[in-house]
Amino acid sequence: MAQAIAFYTLAALILGFAIMVVTTRNTVHSVLFLVMNFLFVAALYVLLGAQFLAVIQILVYAGGIVVLYLFVVMLVNLKRPPEAHQDPHRMTRLGFGMAAAVLLELVVIAAYGATAPSARPPVAVTAAIPVSGNTEQVGWLLYTNYLIPFEIASMLLLVAMIGAIVLAKREL
Amino acid sequence: MIDTVIIPLIKILIVLNATLVAVTYMVLLERKVIAWAQSRLGPMRVGPYGVLQPIADAIKLMIKEDITPVRADKWVFTAAPIIAMVPALIVYAVIPFGPTVNIFGHPVPLYIADINVGLLYIVSVASVGVYGIILAGWSSNSKYPLLASLRASAQLISYEVAVTLTLVSVILMAGTLSMVGIVNAQYNQHVWYAFAQPVAFVIVLVGGLAETNRAPFDLPEAEQELTGGFHTEYSGMRFALFFLAEYANMIVVSSVVTTLFFGGWLPPFPNAAWARFLYFVPSWIWFFLKSFVFLYIFIWIRATLPRYRYDQLMRLGWKVLIPLAIANLVVTGIVKVLML
C-alpha cells in the first residue's frame, strides 16, 4: 500500500515535471525541470530496489548530461526570432508525424504483450547469479548474459565521441 | 521504533548541527592560519583570541539586507544557494565516523546509513552541487558572475572525470562501494590505501581541491579578475550559504580522503599487536583527527601556492590527471588479476 502511494506520487511528479519541461517558455527553467524529472526517476528506481541504477541515473543524467545542456542553453542566444520558413505549418506536421509514430510503436508493443504473454519464457535471472548485492548483480549480468549488447553500446558511444571530435575540429 | 526512527533522527540532528558548527569554525581557523602564515594575528577582538568571531559573522550576515538585483531571474536566484548547500550537507549521510558501538547497551552504528552504493552516492550528489554555481552565475544577469560560473562548471566537470576514474581503482582494491566496507577492507588487507594507491591518493586530493574551488584552483572566485566570482550579486544569508557550502564541501573531501585512503576510524597500525593501546582512543576521534589534518593541509596550500592560470588548470585536468587516472586503473586491474 505504502509502495503504491509512493509510486503514484512519484509518477505524478515525473509526468508533471515532464509537462513543465515542454510548456515552459524560458529555456533554462525548462532544463531545470528536466533535472527535477531525472531526480524523481532516480527515486522511482530506488523504490524498485535498483540503487545502482538510481545513483548512476543521477550521476550521468542529472549531474553530467544536463549540465552540458545548460551550458549550451546559456551560451546560445535564444531570444532571436526563428527564421521564416516557406511552410509555416512544418513544425506542426512534423510533431503530428512523430506523435503518430510513437503511438504506433506503443500499440504494437501493447498488442504483442497482450497476444503472446506465454510465448516468451520468463527470464530466470536471479537464480543464475552467484553474487549478492545490487551493484555486483548488475555487473555480473552485464559481463555474462549481456556482454555483446554492452560491448556494442560502448562501441556506439566511442563512434559518437569520435564523430563529435571530427565535426568540431575542422582541421586535424 | 527506537532503532528505525528515533536513533537515526538523533544522529541526523547531531551530524547536521556538528557540521554547521564545524563549518563556521573552519572559517575562523582559515583566517587564523593564514594570518599566522603572513605574520599577522588574525581576528582578535571578539572573545579571547577571536573565538567568538564566527558567531559575530553569522549575526552580521543574518541581519544584513538581502538584495535581489532587478534584472535577475528571481526564482532561480533564490534557489541557487539552496541547491549549492543541500548536496554539501546530504553527503554526510553515508560517511562513517566510526563502527557500531554500544551506547547504554544499545548497538548504535556511528554512521547514518551504510548503503551498498555509498561511494557512487557521494560522487553523484557532488555532481548535482555544480548546479548551484552555474545557476547563481546565470540568474544574477551580470557579466562577472556568468564568467565565473562558466569557469567553475568547466573546472568541476573536468576534475570530476579524473576523480571518478581514480575512485574506480580504490573500488577495485576494496571490492565494494560501501564506505563502511572500504574501511573494513583496509583493516582486512592490513594496509591503508594511501600506501597501496599513492597515485590515486594524490589525484583525489588535487581533484578535491579543484572541485571545492580552493586555492590554487580558486579561479571561479578570483577576486582580482572577477570581483568575487559567481556570488558577486549575492548578499546577506544567501551569500553565506555559498560560503558555508564551500567549507562543508572541504570537510566532505577531507572525510572522503580519510575514509578511502587513511583507514577512516581505524587507529594507526590497526592490526599490530603492540599498537593495541591505540584502540583506547574512541574511533570517531581518530576519524576527526585525520580529517582535521587534511583540512589544515587545504588551508596551508591556500596560504602557500599562487593561483593557476586557466589554461594551466585545464591542461592539468585533461592532459595529466585523466591519463594518470586511467593508467593507475589499468595497473591496479593487472596487479589485482595477477595477485588472485
Image: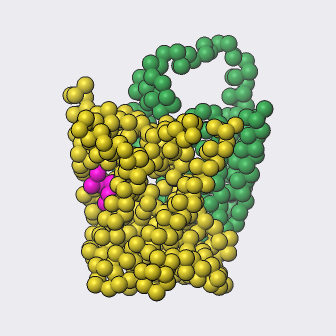
Which residue corresponds to the image point at 56% horizontal and 16% vertical from the top-left? A124
- Choose between B325 and A75: the one closer to the eye: B325
Q: How many marks?
A: 0
For this view, does B243 lie left or right of residue B75?
A: left
Closer to us: A146 or B135 = B135
Q: Position of residue B338 (x, y in %)?
A: 21, 28
Say whether residue B227 is visible: yes
Instruction: Using residue B304 as the reference point, say whether residue A163 is left or right of it.
Output: right
| B202 part of magenta stretch | yes
Write the residue at 49% across / 28% down.
Answer: A133
Quadrant housing the C terminus of chain B? top left
Give coordinates of residue A134: x percent, y percent.
51, 31
- Residue B42 x, y percent position in the rendering: 38, 83
Task: Return the residue nearer the eye: B242 or A56.
Answer: B242
Quick check: B87 above or below B217? above
Chain that is coloured green in the picture = A
Instruction: Specify whether residue A15 is painted magenta.
Output: no
Which residue is rendered at x = 35% and y = 55% of the image? B290
